[in-house]
Image (tube, rainbow, N blue to C red):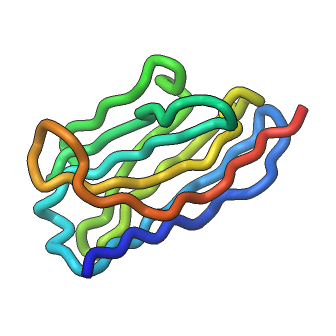
Amino acid sequence: QVQLVESGGGLVQVGGSLRLSCAASGLTFSNYRMGWFRQAPGKEREFVAGIRRSGGSTYYADSVKGRFAISRDNAKNTVYLQMNSLKPEDTAVYYCAAARREAGPYDYWGQGTQVTVSS
């Protein structure tokens, strides 16, 4: 049974930083492309960042480029999202996701972790 468990969310002031973690189990982690998504109240879920299986290639939504960094540790079956210079519009529930293929939809999702940026 595949499980993705996010942690590290919380309340932070504008300009602050948080690091989210997503621990994966029940799958061969190094064989999966990983991603972070977020959903703010009243809005659709949106892509934030992605990282390929080896970790050698990363990609970001324009709204977070230069502020967020995705990374992975295949030995720990964990993907991270370092979030810097946080803004109120970054407030959302953040989800990690895993995909078997290097392109296309994600197959598995975590339960989410709340990030709130206060001004």
> Outermost residue toward the top?
62
Quadrant assignment, res 41: top right
Q: Quadrant of the C terminus?
A: top right
- Dividing the picture into quarters, in which one does residue 14 lie? top right
Residue plotted at (27% across, 56% down): 98
Is the N terminus in the top left, top right, bottom left or bottom right quadrant? bottom left
| Residue furthest out toward the right | 119
90 shown above or below 113? above
Percent from the top left, x then y, of residue 33?
20, 51
Residue 118 lies, with reference to residue 34, above or below; the image says above
The residue depicted at 43 percent of the width and 62 percent of the height is 110
Q: Is residue 69 left or right of residue 12?
A: left
Residue at the image position 42 percent from the left and 24 percent from the top:
61
In the image, is 51 to the left or to the right of 21?
A: left
**Residue 6: x, y in percent?**
51, 65
Front in this rendered view, residue 87 or 108: 108
119 or 70, nearer to the observer: 119
x and y percentages locating residue 114 in the rendered image: 67, 54
Residue at (52% x, 31% y) in the render: 44
| Percent coordinates x, y for residue 75 in the rendering | 25, 74
Report whether 12 appears left or right of 103. right
Count numbered badges in the picture. 0
